[in-house]
Amino acid sequence: MRSITPGLKTFITDRDRLIALACSITDNPAIAEELVQESWIRWHAKSYAEKDARPIFRLIVANLARDWHKRRKTENAYVVEQTGLVSSEVDSERIVIAQQELRCIVKTLNGLPPRVVQAFRMSRVDGLSYAQIAKRLDTVPSRIHGYIVKALTQISLALLDDF
């Protein structure tokens, strides 16, 4: 019979609380779940003492969630910049339309699977090639292409439905 690895009991016991913590920062249950899973990977990669498991898991999850939130704000700022909202010559109607489009895009991305959003962000925001993204996500470039197509299709459909 396999023994329980250090931290596993705490992780299992506190999992719901960790998800709630991540969700309170990200406001996205799917992302919160993914971040909690990532916390286990990070915990498991180190040699932390069992007695430190609870505070370290909370710290890892909180840091991951804050980092995710910062990235999201950066992505949103990038989209705003790309839509031309930084120009002082933009009229108010164009600003309102761009803000509506941005909300629609963000809402659509929030409804997509996390790996699709990751691939889309890496491609459109970070400027990585499909091969680079595939390597980071441990998959093949054709799958990344499918993720990007899915994201762009859903965004296009959402924009068409909204306007």
Image (tube, helix red, strand yellow):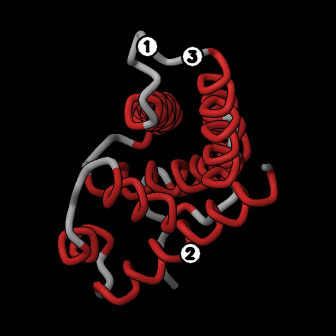
Marks 3/1: CA distance?
Answer: 6 Å
Q: Residue at x 45, y 71 (%)?
A: 148
Q: Is residue 119 toward the left or the right of residue 151 in the image?
A: left
* Percent coordinates x, y for residue 28 in the rendering: 68, 43
Marks 3,1: beta carbons within 8 A = yes
> Badge 3 is on which residue?
91
Residue, disc 1: 89
How far is the residue under mark 1 from the one under mark 2? 34 Å
SS label for mark 2: helix
Pick the residue in front: 134 or 152.
152
Residue 21: tell me if it is visible.
yes
Residue 144 locus on image (x, y percent): 37, 78
- Please state the horizontal and vertical placement of residue 106, each as a whole percent of the image: 62, 43
* Element at label 1: loop
Query: Mark 3 is on which residue type?
Result: Asp
Q: Amino acid at mark 2?
A: Lys
The disc label shown at residue 151, or none: none
> Which of labels 3 and 2 is toward the front?
3
Question: Does residue 49 appear to the left or right of 112 in the view shown?
Answer: left
Label 1: how many Cα within 10 Å (few below 14, some 14–19, many 20+): few
Check disc 1 and give the amino acid type: Glu
Compute the Cα span from label 3 to label 2.
32 Å
The spot of residue 43 in percent (x, y) is: 37, 49
Whether residue 51 is visible: no
Q: Give the vertical position of 11 relative to 149 (above or below).
A: above
Q: Residue at x 44, y 54 (%)?
A: 38
